[in-house]
Image: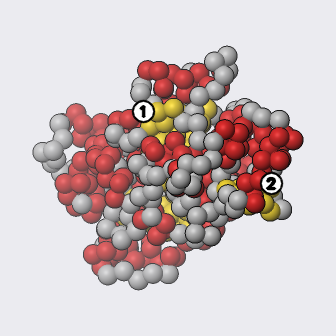
Amino acid sequence: MIAFDLSAGAAQQALSPAGIEFDAQEARARYATAVWCQLIEPGDSVAGRIIGARGPVAALEAVLADGEFPELTPKELVDARKRWLPRLSAGAVAGSLAAAAARGVTLLTRGDPDWPTQLDDLGAHAPLCLWVRGDASALRRLEASVAVVGARAASHYGDHVARELAAELAASGIAVVSGGAYGIDGAAHRAALRAGGLTVALLAGGADRAYPAGHTQLIDDVARRGVVVSEVPCGAAPTKWRFLQRNRLIAALSAATVVVEAGWRSGSLNTAGHAAALSRPLGAVPGQITSATSAGTHRLIREYGAQCITSADDVRELLGMPGETDAAAPGDGAYTGDATRVKDAMSTRVWRDATEIARRAGMAADVVGGILGLLALDGAVESGIEGWRLARIGG
């Protein structure tokens, strides 16, 4: 029997930095959940099974009392206690809760109305709770969402594609989910923010601090205008295991996953594997066949049935949604030839200059300039300070 105060009074005291009063039962449940976060590593299915069966308070009391667990084998229980009990510390739990309150991080449990129920698809490997900085209610608005992930050492091509996809998707109301890392992740978050859309960053360490440190401003921006999420308590450091387990949350939280750029053994393939295991739609962006940074995406397309993604419309199709290009096309099909090529290179959401449109269309810039003028007279396109875009139907 291990002495540890799980009373309502101890729970209320530990939770008091958040400035929220809970009834006795709720306070004990939330406190026990915070204790479990200190004891276990992400994805601990043994803890997930006993907590799922008994609830966080009863499960923790039984562990502390050296009780019996019919749902576990004797070896599972012995090994689990060896993992968990050396981490038991009321001071550490109180410290993480105080750090969370100081940084505006909210403890979100499965009983809370903002809990994203799609995470429950992970079964015994689902997180016990989430530590959330930003708008927790945004986690209920991810029915239309896509994980945009890829290499940290992204090429200029990968960075460009990630920005284009994230900007168009976010501007059309599709949330962009990623991991806050350098490379593809950062490009996707920034583009979604610039487009005024929702973006969610899932961190491998505590939500109270950015990792990598060079993304401190970016993570702060995401927290201010979207949401930053972690399943480990504030103050926890990111580790290799936690990065891998974080990837399962990215895949489970999103309606689909798109790998923009990845090497043959990239960690992004781990995220893709979780998406496939959850039967979530999976897409991958092709690159040059000689590019090592696209070897992983080509592997996903060839060996794992990932859909080939070349535009935001492809992602919408992956999500079962209509494409912007289809919605923007006139019903009579009158535009053909060069005019169609120019419009295919444009978007209703993203402004592009004539040079970029010409590059996308594979046409000479002076020819494209003339066609844009004619299309503008027809009302099919519009111009602005930032360039050109397709006119939106209905204004």
Q: What quarter of the picture does the C terminus occupy?
A: bottom right
Q: Which residue is the extreme one toward the right?
A: 366
Q: Is residue 378 above or below residue 24?
A: above
Q: Is residue 366 above or below residue 3?
A: above
* Residue shown at 74% from the left, 33% from the top: 362
Colouring convention used in this rendered image of the protein:
secondary structure
| Residue that carries the numbered disc 2 in the rendered image | 373
- The amino acid at mark 1 is Gly
Residue 122 position, x and y percent, is 32, 46
Residue appearing at x 50%, y 76% in the figure: 18
Where residue 96 appears, as percent x and y from the top left, is: 52, 62
Q: Quadrant of residue 198?
A: bottom right
Q: Identify the mark nearer the N-term, 1 or 2.
A: 1
Q: Which residue is mark 1?
A: 273
Name which residue lies at 63% across and 47% down: 335
> Residue 95 vs residue 142: left or right?
right
Disc 2 residue type (three-letter): Gly
Describe residue 12's horizontal placement relative to residue 288 as left or right. left
Compared with 346, 225 (above or below) is: below
